Image (spheres, helix red, strand yellow):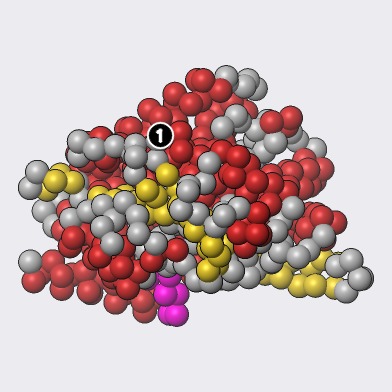
Amino acid sequence: MAARSDSLERYIEGVRKRNPGETEFHQAVYEVAASIIPYIQDKPRYQNMQILERMAEPDRVVMFRVCWEDDKGNIRVNRGYRVQFNNSIGPYKGGIRFHPSVTLSVLKFLGFEQTFKNSLTGLPMGGGKGGADFNPKGKSDSEVMRFCQSFMTELARHIGENTDVPAGDIGVGAREIGYMFGQYKRLTNEFVGVLTGKGLEFGGSLIRTEATGYGTIYMLDNMLTHAGNSVEGKSVVISGSGNVATYAAQKVKQLGGKVLTMSDSSGFIHDPAGIDEEKLAYIIDLKQVRRGRISEYADKYDAEFHEGRPWGVTCDMAVPCATQNELTGDDAAVLLANGCMAVSEGANMPTELSGIKAFQDAGILYAPSKAANAGGVAVSGLEMSQNSARISWKEEELQTLLRDIMKDIHDNCAEYGAENGKVDYLKGANIAGFVKVADAMLAYGVV
Ligand code: NDP
């Protein structure tokens, strides 16, 4: 055991030295390596070929200037990125994030995680991520359009339907994807599936919008079923009020659970009566059409608004759907003290390492993001297939495919994570995601 933790510390020390100051990236690599290093201990083929070392090094990183003009005629400068992490099992695939907190470290952690997540879906997709430190909040539609066009003017030369297929993420929804796809089409004179999350009129897939949130709750439901329980009648605390949070809330409601909270970066609303379909429709209009603040919900309905995060509200289950490290070790302790019995991560890496440890020590059900939120990229993969074949599948087919993929992800994690009659879903997700990518890398030799 000592030898294993020594080699984990040595490995992480190497990652820290090569990537100074990239704390989010170190955290993501640590979380994976803690499962993989013990697993490869007796598998010299992975060790001798330095597979884990190679997996922590992106294939390439592109960084570029994005210049655009605001409505007052001022010239603005942002920084754009695309991290092409690993294309061993398919073209790079992963979202684009527009948020002021975007840094190389954040995008490297997301691209690294994406490689494992995409492998878990069973579809042929490699891992990548991109974005810019641009803040769409408070910008006019014209400003967002000019930014997206400028961003794509540079990005276009690095992506392609068989090379790298970006999608949305924080701050990048249907509007931004439309502007970027339009610019790509104009630059290349090609109509191809180079982005996913597109509008239905120009090659988008049904249920892509809902897929990440729905998948996160399918993962929760699959874990509960495996443990002889269900979502029905349970209270659920959700953070965020964007794409993932909204459809996670809808699926909880459909499965008979009660959603008590939703949030944004200004605070959270607590509605003890539960957020039903009508209230959810109000939130979708408020956040995605009017681009307002979640606090307005408390003015309209009988609910409280509080600053901060929602983890102090007593619940049976927690589903973080906003951003990385939004659930600390202290938050985890509060959730556990209040009787929380399951956590499914809709956001990427929302729980700090100390929080994960607290959940695992307490033995509650914990689904890490790379498994729990893989439904979004899975349906993006299905969008790519539909684009290549120039067809559109029906909603029922896609709903069934999403449910089946999430069930397979659950079962795969349960197989690799089985431990003394229980399941360690983190270990299961890490190992199941690793094996396919690692075996492909072995097949390619030293590249
Ligand atoms: P959206 O931009 O649609 O929504 C993000 C939500 O999180 C908003 O409510 C936003 O509040 C809140 N939020 C963002 N940053 C912070 C912060 N620093 N502190 C508090 N609240 C914050 O993004 P998505 O719903 O698409 O993404 C949410 C998470 O899910 C991210 O981690 C993303 O990587 C992950 N994810 C998304 C997928 C997708 O298909 N969209 C796929 C897989 C993972 P505000 O409105 O105030 O900014």
Residue 31 rendering spot, x and y as whole percentages: 30, 63
Q: Please tell me which residue lies in front, 217 or 350.
A: 217
Residue range corresponding to the magenta coloring: 20-26
Q: Please tell me which residue lies in front, 446 or 178.
A: 178
Q: Residue furthest right?
A: 73
Q: Identify which amino acid the numbered label 1 is placed on.
A: Leu
Left or right position of 357 against 177: left
Q: Please tell me which residue lies in front, 350 or 69.
A: 350
Residue ID for mark 1 = 255
Q: Is residue 403 above or below residue 88?
A: above
Left or right position of 421 against 84: left
Residue 279 rendering spot, x and y as whole percentages: 59, 45
Q: Residue at x 76, y 72 (%)?
A: 77
Q: Is mark 1 within 8 Å of ligand 1?
A: no
Regarding ligand 1, which quadrant of the image does it lie in? bottom right
Residue 163 rendering spot, x and y as whole percentages: 57, 43
Q: Please tell me which residue lies in front, 74 or 242.
A: 242
Is residue 81 among the parts visible in the rendering? no
Q: Residue at x 20, y 50 (%)?
A: 424
Q: Is residue 114 magenta?
A: no
